[in-house]
């Protein structure tokens, strides 16, 4: 393993931990950014200093951002949650395999199960603390308590992905009443990319703020790649198991069947995947609804299952075996992401009968998942023009009983390949504001090539912007603290504080240094005589 | 003049012209993108070809995108509109200066004047044709007729910038019932940038789709820089005259006065500036409203005028002389962009009393401009979180009597310096959809440094995305034709057509080539076995 595992560092930042009240042994990591004081000069020329509060930032870097933790990629990250899981009980080691667990026969162990019982887990208190970054410090009242988290999970409005076999993962929550989360897709396809590269991308994604990772590998070494990623991922990992099942039948869709799929599921449950995208919403009698589309079926899983249905003239076996799937997933607390196999792949196809028929099916399935205490959420589009976005959210809430929505963008226009991080961020911010719980990032290379490390960075930052803009618009407690701190720093010409508080301090500093004149008490863009901020401060002074 | 004046070329594209019906002598340039045919293979293995319609694209390149026109930057572009202006009459050469015109004493010559009389000008038919790109060809009915254009200008709901001294400029229209336009800011500040660089940026902006240019130079050679830009600009040019006035008093704000400002205005009117940002909405009694802001006053012009008011304890001389300003501008048909000197510079300051007090003043002034047949529009923010955007648009429509709104973004969060093209495109797309007529671009270097050529490109493309997304959402006639053509090409693996139709063919192709495997009948991201589009076409075939 040659991948670059050097720690995650941000300027003027330190990793700090907050303990639980219900569970004093939990330690929730966050990044504390220290600011410089505000300097004012009085009429006598004397300088006065006024401290500025540190700002706490949600940290997805896990142990990588803690310089005190040595990480050996061969061993993987510390198994923080293992003790919690074992202490709760209900699990046993799988047939002699060390450190691989599942529920004991007839036992229930999912977060949803505990939530329905009114039992608050360590994971629940962990996310409550994590969601309230800065609130306690600044006396901001938040609706997010461990009890609230518990209730949201119990009703299915939120998902806390937490496979018992991924104890390295730090608890996080996906639901409309929480911070909007973002997912980064990584994974190799056949000939491109190797394992080191994928693991590096995984850590890189966590560095910039990715909340979950989906490993969409379809190439060789699919199991080994995933093993490296999961063992070194501090965030939940999702997959699309049909990709591996298809590898197992050498790409022959007609040979896919429930047994092969089932074995794949179990293997991945044991490996520690936290959520599976499963395209069980594709129904034989609905496939024809996509016939008149401009772009047909653009979901890989959706097109595979549609073809399978048509070859065999049979109902989708994932739909038929949905209860069996839930029974398996419940044993590990793996969540289902109900895949939108019929999502629109062009704005022309948005909100059509095919898409909404599948949504109705998902609404039926989500209740069946909940009945078995399986956490679940719903995937959404795709390509949707702005005036059709709200209908997506409204129908999803109505048909899917408040389950979290997880969308890919949506892209609001099709005319900008090479800029689809932007076309999609416009849609993502809007749908996030309307209530979408997690946004799947889109990189500039969408439609063109697989993303490299720099594309992952651009995709993540773009989506942090969309998600944060949605948090601000939704009024998430304390969401504007970082905005206000950065704006105050900007107004006071505390350039370094401005950069240190920003989503990408490195790039901001690099751009700042590209300017041709010297640092000083004026805004770079205007030059000294025309600096609005300097003049504005003089306006205040001269009164 | 060493600047790179080589023509604007796009792959598989040609410059074509459409003639007027009312005025057969007008020639409206547009870019025609030729597509390859769709190829299908039947059961006998025989290939069948089906033509795909060419797509017409709005072209802001002017003569630069016509290979048949030789351009000598020393002479400037052909003076297309000069004949039209002279034929209409009402103008005379200014005191012996060749080719510098203004209205004869007591004559009215503005587009608004003609519109109020019900007279359709060549400029009006020109923009009607230009707005309906693709419609005639495809039989799409459009509400945009020359008569409609005339009526929109008469009521003040639209502005057609057209200084009689910038006859090189191709007519374009700014109004909520037309395509959303974008403006690019260029200009040097003191020590940075030289004239060649600025002219190159100007042409570069037109290449990528900028609809107007603002020259915000504040440095040396301000007059000469502007002269080069205007003579070589096929799009309307705007300025902020207070910058030059301030240079004239060596940066001493207290020395500014009406005479100096008036002389600057006249000089720029004669030079051919099409619209002026004038900060006449700043009122002495309102300045204190910005006192409790996080970021004070962030508009350069706004801070200059506020400081002037406070030094002299007098009302803003631009407000006091508003009617005099209008009298001057009416002589040349220069439009006023009522500058929002108190726009918020952080999301914390959005929609506050200072901002809205100024908007009320603008509402009063716009009616006074219209009374003098001066075309006018209203500038807007700035930094506004998503949930406060709609109020901006609603109040602007209500208070400013339907005058076009021209906003800078708005940025929906402050936390992403180095990505503010994206934070602002999210807001721009939304406010464009709600009715904003023109969006001022923001580049990735906003807040950090002046943009270079690549930043201009990124800023323009980002804003073309926002504007186009808004056009689609508003239902502009034919807006989705380009989206649909590109999506069809994508589905049929006509990669080159996909790229040629995109906003940035070069970058799309570059990204595509970065992939590691060969071109073929599958989507790059998935590899051959997993290509959803290929499978989807098979799904259709196998029925």
Image (tube, coloured by chain):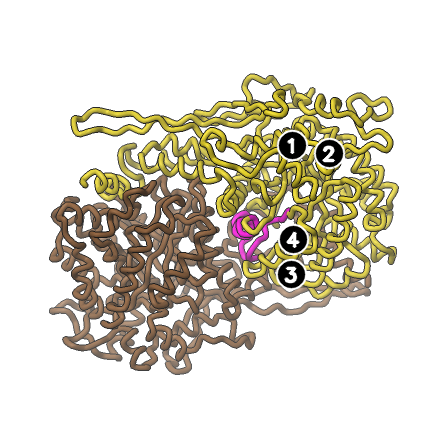
Chain colours: A yellow, B brown
> Which dot marks residue A220?
none
Q: Which residue carries the number 1 mark?
A: A124
Near mark 1 (Cα within 10 A), the count class, few <14, some 14-19 or many ≥20, is: many
- Badge nearest the viewer, 4 or 2: 2
Mark 2 in CB contact with mark 1 (< 8 angstroms): yes
Going from N to C along the chain, the mark reached first, 4 or 2, is 2
* Quarter of the image where the N terminus of chain A is located: top right
Parent chain of label 2: A
- Badge nearest the viewer, 3 or 4: 4
Total numbered labels? 4
In the foreground, B319 or B140: B319
In the foreground, B5 or B334: B334
x and y, in percent, of residue A89 in the image: 78, 25
Splitting the image into 4 quarters, where does residue A388 fall? bottom right
> Which dot marks residue A114?
2
Near mark 2 (Cα within 10 A), the count class, few <14, some 14-19 or many ≥20, is: some
Element under label 4? helix
Residue range highlighted in magenta: A406-432
Q: Is residue A240 visible?
A: yes
> Which dot marks residue A351?
3
x and y, in percent, of residue A362 in the image: 74, 52
The answer to whether tags 2 and 1 share a subunit is yes
The answer to whether tags 4 and 2 share a subunit is yes
Parent chain of label 4: A
x and y, in percent, of residue B342 in the image: 30, 50
Parent chain of label 3: A
- Badge nearest the viewer, 2 or 3: 2
> Which dot marks residue A397?
4
* Quarter of the image where the C terminus of chain A is located: top left
């Amino acid at each position: 393993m040659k991948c670059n595992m050097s720690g995650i560092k941000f300027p003027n930042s330190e990793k700090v931990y907050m303990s639980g009240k219900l569970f004093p042994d939990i330690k929730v990591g966050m990044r504390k950014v220290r600011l410089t004081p505000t300097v004012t000069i009085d009429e006598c020329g004397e300088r006065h200093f006024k401290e500025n509060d540190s700002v706490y930032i949600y940290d997805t870097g896990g142990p990588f951002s803690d310089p005190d933790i040595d990480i050996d990629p061969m061993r993987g990250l510390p198994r923080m949650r293992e003790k919690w899981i074992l202490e709760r009980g209900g699990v046993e080691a799988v047939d002699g395999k060390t450190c691989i667990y599942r529920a004991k026969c007839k036992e229930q162990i999912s977060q949803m199960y505990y939530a329905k019982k009114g039992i608050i887990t360590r994971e629940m208190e962990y996310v409550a603390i994590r969601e309230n970054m800065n609130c306690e410090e600044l006396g901001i009242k938040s609706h997010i308590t461990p009890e609230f988290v518990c209730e949201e999970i119990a009703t299915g409005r939120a998902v806390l992905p937490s496979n018992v076999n991924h104890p390295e993962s730090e608890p996080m929550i996906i639901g409309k009443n929480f911070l909007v989360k973002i997912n980064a897709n990584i994974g190799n396809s056949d000939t491109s990319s190797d394992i080191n590269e994928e693991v590096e991308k995984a850590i890189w994604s966590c560095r910039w703020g990715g909340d979950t990772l989906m490993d969409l590998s379809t190439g060789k070494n699919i199991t080994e790649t995933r093993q490296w990623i999961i063992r070194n991922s501090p965030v939940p990992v999702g997959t699309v198991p049909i990709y591996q099942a298809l590898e197992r039948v050498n790409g022959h869709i007609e040979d896919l069947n429930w047994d092969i799929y089932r074995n794949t599921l179990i293997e991945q449950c044991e490996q520690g995947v936290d959520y599976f995208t499963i395209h069980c919403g594709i129904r034989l009698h609905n496939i024809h609804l996509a016939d008149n589309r401009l772009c047909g079926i653009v979901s890989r899983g959706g097109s595979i299952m549609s073809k399978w249905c048509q070859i065999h003239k049979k109902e989708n076996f994932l739909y038929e075996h949905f209860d069996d799937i839930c029974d398996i997933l419940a044993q590990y607390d793996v969540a289902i992401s109900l895949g939108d196999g019929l999502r629109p792949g062009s704005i022309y196809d948005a909100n059509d009968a095919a898409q909404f028929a599948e949504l109705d099916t998902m609404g039926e399935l989500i209740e069946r998942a909940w009945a078995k205490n399986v956490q679940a959420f719903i995937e959404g589009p795709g390509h949707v023009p702005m005036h059709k976005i709200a209908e997506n959210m409204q129908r999803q809430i109505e048909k899917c009983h408040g389950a979290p929505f997880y969308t890919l963008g949506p892209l609001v226009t099709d005319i900008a390949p090479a800029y689809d991080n932007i076309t999609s961020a416009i849609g993502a911010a809007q749908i996030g504001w309307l209530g979408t719980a997690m946004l799947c990032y889109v990189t500039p290379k969408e439609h063109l090539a697989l993303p490299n490390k720099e594309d992952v960075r651009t995709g993540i930052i773009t989506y942090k912007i969309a998600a944060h803009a949605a948090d601000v618009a939704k009024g998430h407690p304390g969401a504007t603290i970082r905005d206000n701190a950065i704006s105050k720093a900007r107004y006071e010409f505390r350039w370094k504080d401005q950069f240190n508080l920003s989503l990408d301090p490195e790039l901001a500093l690099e751009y700042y240094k590209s300017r041709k004149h010297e640092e000083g008490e004026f805004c770079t863009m205007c030059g000294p005589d025309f600096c609005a901020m300097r003049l504005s401060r003089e306006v205040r002074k001269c009164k």
